[in-house]
Image (spheres, helix red, strand yellow):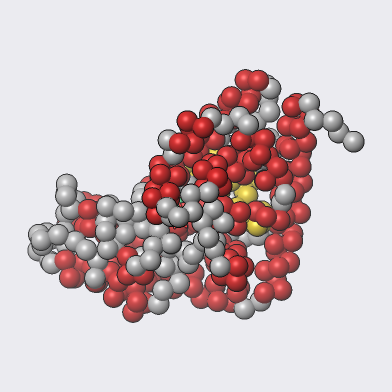
Amino acid sequence: MFNNQPVSYSGVQPSGNLTIGNYLGAIKNFASFSEAYKCFYCVVDEHAITVRQTPADLRRRTYETLALYMACGLDPEKNTLYVQSHVHEHAELAWILNCFTMFGELSRMTQFKDKSAKHADNINAGLFTYPTLMAADILLYQTDVVPVGVDQKQHVELCRDIAERFNQLFPDTFTVPEPIISKSGMKIMSLADPTKKMSKSDENVNAVVYILDDKDTIIRKFKRAVTDSETCVRLGEGKDGINNLIGIYSCFTGKSAEEIEKEFEGRGYGEFKLAVGEACADALAPVQQKYRELLADKGALEAQMKKGAEEASWYARRTLSKVQKKLGFVKI
Ligand code: AQP
């Protein structure tokens, strides 16, 4: 809460080309908070370096992610849009929160386990303490709600625990945030292995639909999506592929699972996959168009980064200074 206005905070890593998982699980829902909340949406580049990034790619994707935020309907006049590394308070508060986070808590984080398995040659301390940096992101802005995909819920819950622990020692320091998982925030699964989350860092490009894929590519990827040996479009146990496609179709069309099952009664998987591809491509087309226009003006994006960083810093400074005072750091 800031000045009696509830705060919404979220972020996306510029660690790859954004997927429909990032879109449906997070970005698409961000704009709906703009009226009732003071909103901060961050391009979290410091999180991205927990796995190795090529510097030129990281730089390019930082611009692209900001442009995508705006293309997905985030008005920079109503939302504070900025880049994490432009506001140094994130890293400073993260260090402090590291001292209030237990080794055992971090060890239990599913994302740490998954990412350590995936990057066994680079299990760095940053990968391990990623959730404390995320807690700092959220707590710096006295955040009330964090709209995220269900895969990030565990991290927001840890953030709550850290905030409550800190508040117990130093009362009234942080607002304790709530995760908000929207209906469309269900976990979008890989098209090649529907037991796995769809991730922008997946090496198999056919497993992932990117927000910026063209219509033919989107339809081709859905046509190749792994399903099962049945032919009936219905939700069911052991039907992870079809369950995932029904979920995606539902998110893009607003239809319920029952309506979808009815619509495709007696029609095969081929027809269904084509319909999912078309619904997805049609929904993304206006976003792609707007994105191209925004990306063409790098100067305007940089001006936006600067404005966003200035706005965010004002709030971040206030909280960090309060924390430092409570801890006993000498102010000069
Ligand atoms: N498959 C998904 N389904 C639903 N929501 C998802 N999100 C990501 N993937 C899915 C949501 O997108 C937001 C931003 O995610 P992120 O970039 O901060 O990190 P992530 O969750 O680690 O996303 P990726 O795509 O899997 O990135 P990489 O491959 O770099 O690790 C979050 O709100 C997340 O819930």
Where does residue 159 sit, x and y in percent of width and height? 54, 35
Of residues 322 and 105, the one drawn nearer to the viewer in this rendering: 105
Q: What residue is rendered at 66% in x and 76% in y?
A: 297
Side of 60 where 180 appears, left or right: left
> Image quarter for residue 298?
bottom right
> Image quarter for residue 301?
bottom right
Side of 205 where 28 appears, left or right: right
Where does residue 303 sit, x and y in percent of width and height? 73, 66
Q: What residue is rendered at 40% in x and 44% in y?
A: 113
Q: What residue is rendered at 76% in x and 54% in y?
A: 310
Instruction: Tell me the quadrant of the picture where the C terminus can be found.
Output: top right
Q: Is residue 184 visible?
A: no
Where does residue 51 sit, x and y in percent of width and height? 51, 56
Q: What residue is rendered at 30% in x and 71% in y?
A: 221
Vertical position of residue 151 compared to residue 18: above or below = above
Residue ranking furthest to the right: 332
Of residues 132 and 159, the one drawn nearer to the viewer in this rendering: 132
